[in-house]
Image (cartoon, helix red, strand yellow):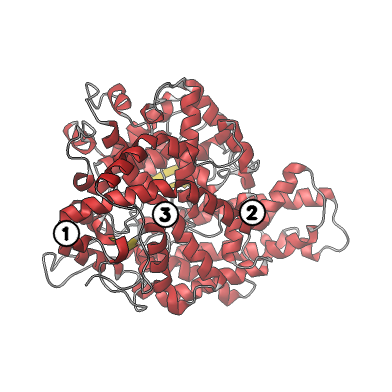
């Protein structure tokens, strides 16, 4: 996940969540932009709305320069406040963060009025793009009470998630309070279906107290978007992709249709194996899988149940990375150094000293923090940080590489003007680190000394383990924002929040709740990105783009053989090509950036289908042999559980 400043440019006022992290100083690192008169003394700013007559191009350029300087100053202050809030969750830090957020919203409201004076003007291409991006990033709540409410709601909702715990009074965990990290560990390792049901239901209670505030929070966002001429905030979010909102919705559905056959085959195979493990109760009505049995609190990735669903007659991956890391005594900082070294092998400069001094790598014992991994660009220059409660395990090794991708991207575009300092689109930002992580192959592990020899392994096992994370995630990545878009538009009413949530989960994922849910519950709130207001479509797009990026870099590195065997570790040519795309930031429409690396100007799922083609063939063979037909039938009462 990435952080507040980047998010400001792509989807206003969401907390940037991209598993995020490392920082490095570019050789030509620029000085921090000087504060403008407007930033230091807003009363002296050029108030375009108060100027009579048709503005000149020079006036537009001056106004834009002052606006960028002011927003740079405000986002730095907001980043600092949000960093403190995320690392020291108290009423005081929530108030500090809310006040910084409110100052930014106040400025955006003023700018939203001022920018109208320039409507209809013709600008040179660079200035024209700045005006377009600025309009998409502004937020207008003219009423002061609305702004205050919005800021406090944003801080309190994320704070509630960060403080969230399940504290049972009976059963195995009685007397203990379980954080989300504890819940994740239990659901990854437990094979007791009753225990899994208990902790799943226990963590889901975290969302219920948020529900009433969330209704107001979403209404205020759409009110702000409507002030700027958008239908609602969902339409505004979708307008950030260099195409009309409806076209983007259709583009997302096109990509899903490309990959759905692969997901359906995987779902059918996993369903069969879970029935073998747990019996008929593993599956609900018409082929849907119990959401608590897939190794993750949200059933968003299934890699933790590989021991259940992996082929019994296979050599497997031939290694256990978690055990290797522990045997090698790799600590939390060591995990981050492995990620940094990959980027260095591609020709990128190392991370700066301040990264190691200011980041959070280990969960503190003395206070609550938001442990969700995130990458921070505090000063829009070179104060990059990782905030992550690292665990020594396979999953976190990959997450570290992902998060560092954000920070190296942030550094690459720090020479761009403020409004271009972001990913080509938010899916790009999420995809960079994951592209690197695809190169965590046995050959790579041998190159970095984590294994001595490349073990005998089964490609089916390797691809299945990958698919349980990457392919299983796709429908979840899609449905989060499909739900929010409908909430923003009013298509989903507050009285139906939970029902609509499970309708979409059944439709796209084919999963069902293990216990009955009602509208007294608010299960979306138990997923960080909902209370943190982080747009989620970026993760779906990233899951497509990372394979497209990976295939292009493998071709640049001269890879031969099956795509999934490629590692471009140490290839400076592939690294240089990647860096040219990263340096563009948001200065050009994303198809131009995509073409710089891949030679293609449209998102295409053919790369992920090529990567998993051998697995798709194997899954179809297994399903046919078991007499299993892929697919499921959603229930008309989606909240009915198995209890």
- Residue that protrudes farthest toward the right in the picture: 53
Q: Quick check: 249 left or right of 614? A: right
Circle 2 Cα neighbour tier, 10 Å, few/some/many (<14 / 14–19 / ≥20): many
Q: Is residue 619 above or below residue 56?
A: above
**Residue at numbered disc 2:** 70
Q: Nearer the viewer, mark 1 or mark 2?
A: 1
Mark 1 vs mark 2, CA separation in Å: 61 Å
Q: Quick check: 43 left or right of 560? A: right
Q: Assign a secondary structure to mark 2.
A: helix
Residue 341: tell me if it is visible.
yes
Q: Toward the viewer: 434 or 416? A: 434
Q: How many marks?
A: 3
Q: Nearer the viewer, mark 3 or mark 1?
A: 1
Which badge, 2 or 3, comes first in the chain's sequence? 2
Q: Are marks 3 and 1 in contact (CB under 8 Å)?
A: no
Q: Position of residue 119 (x, y in %)?
A: 79, 58
**Residue at numbered disc 1:** 279
Q: Which mark is residue 156?
A: none
Q: Which mark is residue 475?
A: 3
Which badge, 1 or 2, comes first in the chain's sequence? 2
Q: Assign a secondary structure to mark 3.
A: helix
Mark 2 vs mark 3, CA separation in Å: 39 Å
Circle 1 Cα neighbour tier, 10 Å, few/some/many (<14 / 14–19 / ≥20): few
Q: Position of residue 80 (x, y in %)?
A: 47, 53
For residue 340, which quarter of the picture? Answer: top left
Which badge, 3 or 1, comes first in the chain's sequence? 1
Q: Nearer the viewer, mark 2 or mark 3?
A: 3
């Amino acid at each position: 996940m990435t952080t507040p400043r980047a998010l400001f440019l792509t989807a206003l006022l969401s907390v940037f969540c991209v598993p995020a992290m490392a920082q490095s100083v570019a050789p030509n690192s620029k000085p921090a932009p000087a504060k403008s008169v407007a930033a230091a003394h807003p009363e002296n700013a050029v108030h375009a709305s108060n100027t009579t007559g048709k503005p000149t191009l020079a006036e537009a350029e001056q106004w834009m320069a002052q606006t960028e300087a002011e927003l740079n100053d405000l986002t730095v202050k907001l980043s600092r406040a949000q960093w403190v809030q995320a690392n020291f969750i108290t009423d005081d830090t929530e108030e500090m963060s809310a006040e910084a957020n409110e100052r930014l919203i106040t400025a955006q409201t003023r700018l939203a009025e001022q920018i109208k004076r320039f409507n209809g003007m013709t600008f040179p291409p660079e200035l024209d793009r700045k005006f377009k991006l600025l309009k998409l990033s502004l937020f207008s709540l003219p009423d002061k009470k609305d702004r205050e409410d919005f800021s406090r709601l944003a801080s309190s909702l994320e704070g509630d998630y960060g403080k969230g715990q399940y504290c049972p009074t009976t059963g195995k965990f009685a007397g203990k309070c379980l954080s989300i990290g504890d819940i994740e560990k239990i659901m990854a390792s437990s094979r007791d279906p009753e225990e899994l049901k208990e902790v799943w239901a226990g963590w889901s209670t975290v969302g219920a107290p948020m529900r009433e505030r969330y209704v107001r929070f979403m209404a205020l966002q759409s009110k702000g978007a409507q002030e700027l001429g958008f239908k609602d905030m969902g339409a505004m979010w979708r307008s950030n992709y260099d195409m009309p909102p409806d076209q983007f919705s259709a583009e997302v559905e096109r990509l899903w249709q490309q990959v759905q056959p692969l997901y359906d085959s995987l779902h059918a195979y996993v369903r069969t194996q879970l029935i073998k493990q747990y019996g008929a109760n593993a599956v609900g009505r018409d082929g849907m899988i119990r959401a608590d049995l897939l190794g993750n609190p949200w059933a968003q990735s299934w890699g933790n149940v590989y021991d259940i669903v992996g082929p019994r007659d296979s050599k497997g991956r031939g290694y256990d990375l978690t055990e290797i890391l522990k045997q090698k005594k790799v600590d939390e900082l060591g995990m981050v150094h492995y990620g940094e070294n990959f980027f260095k092998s591609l020709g990128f400069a190392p991370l700066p000293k301040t990264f190691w001094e200011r980041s959070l790598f280990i969960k503190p014992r003395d206070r609550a923090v938001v442990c969700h991994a995130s990458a921070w660009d505090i000063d829009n220059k070179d104060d990059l940080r990782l905030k992550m409660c690292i665990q020594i395990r396979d999953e976190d090794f990959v997450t570290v590489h992902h998060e560092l991708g954000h920070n190296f991207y942030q550094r690459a575009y720090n020479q761009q003007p403020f409004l271009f300092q972001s990913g080509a689109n938010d899916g790009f930002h999420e995809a960079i680190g994951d592209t690197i992580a695809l190169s965590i192959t046995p050959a790579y592990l041998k190159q970095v000394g984590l294994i001595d020899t490349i073990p005998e392994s089964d490609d089916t096992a390797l691809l299945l383990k990958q698919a349980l994370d990457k392919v299983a995630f796709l429908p979840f990545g899609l449905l989060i924002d499909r739900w929010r878009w409908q909430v923003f538009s009013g298509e989903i009413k507050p009285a139906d929040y939970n029902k609509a949530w499970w309708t979409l989960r059944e439709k796209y994922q084919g999963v069902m709740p293990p216990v009955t849910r009602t509208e007294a519950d608010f299960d979306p709130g138990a997923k960080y990105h909902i209370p943190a207001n982080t747009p989620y479509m970026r993760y779906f797009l990233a899951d497509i783009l990372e394979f497209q990026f990976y295939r292009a870099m493998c071709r640049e590195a001269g890879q031969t053989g099956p795509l999934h065997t490629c590692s471009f570790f140490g290839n400076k040519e592939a690294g240089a090509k990647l860096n040219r795309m990263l340096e563009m930031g948001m200065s050009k429409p994303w198809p131009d950036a995509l073409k710089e690396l891949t030679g293609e100007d449209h998102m295409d799922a053919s790369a992920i289908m090529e990567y998993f083609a051998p697995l798709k063939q194997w899954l179809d063979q297994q399903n046919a042999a078991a007499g299993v037909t892929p697919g499921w039938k959603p229930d008309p009462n989606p909240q009915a559980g198995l209890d």
